[in-house]
Image (cartoon, grey):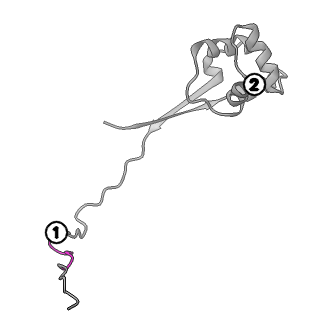
């Protein structure tokens, strides 16, 4: 079974620029109109960072604000993961037989 590497790109800043929104406060007022209450720092992180998770009410509000679909807001990419190279029959040292520490001998000071 082949592993897949899945990633995504967040296009909120591009959509904001196309709609002449240059500040996060512009977006915050539109979200508030749609019943989404976020703090200024939350809106800033939503715009400037790539969110790891987003609630469906926020996603649907953003799609309504910009008149877009979730596919225009988030671009998903997936590709087969590159296989890892395995070392076969290399010179393996058995630590139990080859590299054993010498037993310590305790000698009194007398």
**In the image, residue 95 lies at what x, y percent?**
20, 69
Q: Nearer the viewer, residue 108 or 7?
A: 108
Q: Residue furthest top?
A: 34
* Main SS category, magenta section: loop
* Element on which disc 1 rests: loop
Quadrant (top left, top right, bottom left, bottom right) of the N terminus? top left
Name the residue at 75% across, 11% down: 32
- On whether residue 94 falls in the magenta region, the answer is no
Q: Say which residue label 1 marks.
A: 96
Name the residue at 38% across, 38% down: 3
**In the image, residue 58 lies at what x, y percent?**
64, 15
Who comes first in sequence, dot 2 or dot 1?
2
Name the residue at 58% across, 17% down: 55
Quarter assignment of residue 60:
top right
Q: Say which residue label 2 marks.
A: 40
* Element on which disc 2 rests: helix
Q: Nearer the viewer, residue 83 or 91?
A: 91
User: Quick check: 62 left or right of 18?
Assistant: left
Magenta span of residues = 97-102
Q: Nearer the viewer, residue 11 or 23?
A: 23
* As drawn, 99 above or below 41: below
Within-10-Å neighbours for mark 2: few <14, some 14–19, many 20+:
few
**In the image, residue 13 lies at what x, y percent?**
74, 29
Q: CA distance from mark 2 to mark 1?
A: 60 Å
**In the image, residue 49 lies at what x, y percent?**
66, 34
Name the residue at 56% across, 30% down: 52
């Amino acid at each position: 079974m082949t592993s897949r590497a899945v990633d995504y790109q967040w296009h909120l800043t591009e959509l904001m620029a196309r709609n002449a929104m240059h500040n996060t406060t512009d977006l915050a007022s539109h979200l508030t109109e749609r019943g989404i209450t976020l703090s200024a720092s939350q809106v800033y992180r939503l715009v400037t960072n790539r969110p790891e998770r987003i609630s469906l009410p926020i996603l649907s509000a953003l799609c309504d604000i910009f008149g877009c679909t979730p596919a225009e807001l988030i671009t998903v990419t997936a590709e087969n993961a590159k296989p890892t190279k395995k070392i076969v029959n290399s010179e393996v040292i058995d630590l139990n037989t080859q590299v054993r520490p010498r037993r310590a001998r305790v000698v009194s000071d007398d």
